[in-house]
Image (cartoon, rainbow, N blue to C red):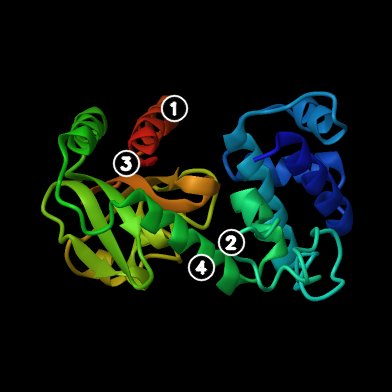
Amino acid sequence: MDEQRQRELTSRAAAEAGLDAEELWIRYFALGGSLAQIEIDAYLQGLQMIPSLERDILTSALCEAFEEAGREPPGLGAGGGWAEPSSGTGSAAGAGAGDPVESLGAAGAVFLSAEQAEAQRMRALRKTGLLDSPPEERFDRITRRAQEYFGVSSSIVALIAEHRQFLKSVIGGLGQNLERESTFCNRTIRSAGPMVVCDTLTDDRFRSSPLVVGEPHIRFYAGHPLLGPGGWTIGTLCVIDQNPRGFTDEDRRMLRFLAEAAQQEVMP
């Protein structure tokens, strides 16, 4: 992906969303971004580049802003704005092989509908060749380390398919396939940073989840998204336990470190 092109699209999208550098930074930081506001401001002005993960977090922050405003991201539909038209069309709606929006990977998500973005995410997952593949030591050693460090009952590398969650690596007594909509990891892939729930019974999003009130009776969850080809989020590294617990800054750094290790193994 052309980094300069991605920066230009990000800056344009921020302006269209009515976000100044401070407002965008607040959203970015809330999603797990690690750079200072001055660095984000310099990036938007073209004065410096930033790592690809941080660029993807900015993209997610912009997508959330458009969603909260009840607006379609720019570039949808014929003559819809900033997306460069592919040969013979003026729309991002038909994104496919050779389409300039598709070539941007996840950075182009602001120009796609939810259905189009999900299709691209699934394409990235299939490219890895990992879905429904057997266990592999290269993933298992990461989940073992996660379980040992956090002292939890289970640690997994989960891949989120169209309607289910497939566990590529699992330490602990969890089923390999679960309905996607019921899983914690399905929420995690919608954010650019980690999702941590220290006590599910005090969290309105999860207190009535079948995975909390029934097996495996999750009380603690911490998950980090895993990026696949094109920067699309295809899964998570997560740890769970049947007892609530805290989560320190050092825990957050370790979760990110282990997720980055798993992410290197995900790439084809």
Q: Which amino acid does label 1 sit on?
A: Arg
Relative to 41, is 34 on the left or the right? left
Would you say 225 lies left or right of 94 here? left
Label 1 sits on a secondary structure element that is: helix
- Nearer to us: label 1 or label 2: 2
* Mark earlier in primary sequence (4, 1): 4
Q: Which amino acid does label 3 sit on?
A: Arg
Label placed on residue 97? 2
Indicate the secondary structure of the residue bearing disc 2. loop
Q: How crowded is mark 4: few (under 14 residues within 10 Å), some or many (20 or more)?
A: some
Sooner in the amino-acid sequence: mark 3 or mark 2 = 2
Rendering coords of residue 34 (x, y %):
61, 30
Reading the image, the residue beneath label 3 is 245
Q: Where 161 falls versus 230 (above or below)? A: below
Q: For the residues carrying marks 4 and 2, which lies nearer the camera in this image?
A: 2
- Kindly report the distance in space between the C-alpha atoms of the residues bearing marks 3 and 2: 46 Å
Q: Disc 4 versus disc 2: distance between alpha carbons?
A: 13 Å
Q: Quick one: 178 or 123, which is closer to the camera?
A: 123
Residue at x 70%, y 56% (from the top left corner): 100
**Visible residue check, residue 208:** no
Give the amino acid type for the residue marked by disc 4 in the picture: Ala
Q: Mark 1 points at which residue?
A: 253
Graded by Cα atoms within 10 Å as few (under 14), some (14 to 19) or many (20 or more), the crowding at tag 1 reads few
Label 4 belongs to which residue?
A: 119
User: Of tags 4 and 1, which is closer to the observer?
Assistant: 4
**Gap in Å between the C-alphas at discs 4 and 1?**
31 Å
Q: Earlier in the sequence, mark 3 or mark 1?
A: 3
Tag 2 or tag 4, which sits nearer the N-term?
A: 2
